[in-house]
Image (cartoon, rainbow, N blue to C red):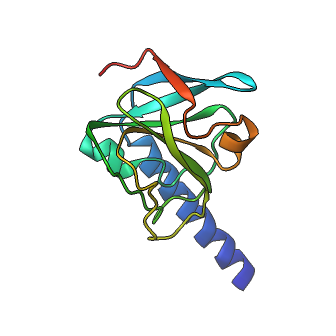
């Protein structure tokens, strides 16, 4: 009986979460191309350019396929901090300057925490991808980036 109740509670929570995700407006999409020592790496991204979409970010996502992520576009370059309160996945955060060069990477940011993450440098853009992808593609400070189908 207890097991059946637990299964029903988990199923109800998953259904509620899935419904909440379906009700979120679809974000514009584009791509970010990193010019790395190992060759180009193209990441398909959802574009978070409004206060609301940047605040929501990748919260409540249960999966993030390889070579996919989110591009956060800010109105100006400044030191931006991120926390992962309702983010269920470990992420790499790649911070980009106005000139679209990488100024720093927060690797393998643990999920479900309120600890702020930053690179201590001004950035205008931040790309979030699954944990480990930045290192796998040799992305680090100085890596050059271009945008594809990203309106600013």
Between residue 140 and residue 51, name the one nearer to us.
140
Residue plotted at (52% across, 46% down): 104
Residue found at x 55% / y 64%? 12
Relative to 151, is 1 above or below? below
Rendered view: 99 above or below 64:
above
Q: Is residue 111 left or right of residue 27?
A: right
Q: Quadrant of the C terminus?
A: top left
Left or right placement of residue 107 versus residue 54 in this view: right
Q: Position of residue 2 (x, y in %)?
A: 70, 85
Q: Is residue 65 left or right of residue 29?
A: right
Using the rendered view, name the quadrant where residue 136 is placed.
top right
Compare residues 136 and 120 and report the one nearer the observer: 120
Displayed quadrant of residue 141: top right
Q: Position of residue 96 (x, y in %)?
A: 44, 36
Which residue is at a point 48% across and 58% down the rendered structure image?
A: 16
**Residue at the front extreme?**
142
Rendered location of residue 145, percent (x, y):
52, 24
Tell which of 67 and 101 is nearer to you: 101
Q: Position of residue 29 (x, y in %)?
A: 45, 24
Q: Is residue 26 at all visible to an observer of this figure?
A: no
The quadrant of the image that shows the N terminus is bottom right
């Amino acid at each position: 009986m207890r097991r059946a109740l637990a299964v029903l509670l988990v199923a109800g929570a998953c259904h509620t979460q899935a419904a909440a995700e379906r009700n979120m407006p679809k974000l514009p999409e584009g791509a970010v191309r990193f010019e790395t020592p190992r060759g180009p790496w193209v990441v398909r991204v959802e574009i978070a350019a409004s206060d609301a979409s940047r605040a929501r970010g990748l919260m409540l996502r249960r999966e993030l396929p390889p070579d996919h992520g989110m591009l956060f576009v800010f109105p100006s370059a400044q030191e931006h901090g991120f926390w992962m309160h309702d983010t269920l996945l470990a992420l790499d955060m790649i911070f980009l300057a106005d000139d679209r060069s990488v100024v720093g990477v927060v690797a393998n940011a643990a999920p479900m925490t309120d600890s702020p993450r930053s690179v201590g440098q001004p950035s205008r853009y931040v790309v979030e991808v699954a944990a480990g992808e930045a290192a796998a593609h040799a992305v680090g400070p100085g890596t050059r980036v271009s945008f594809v189908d990203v309106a600013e």
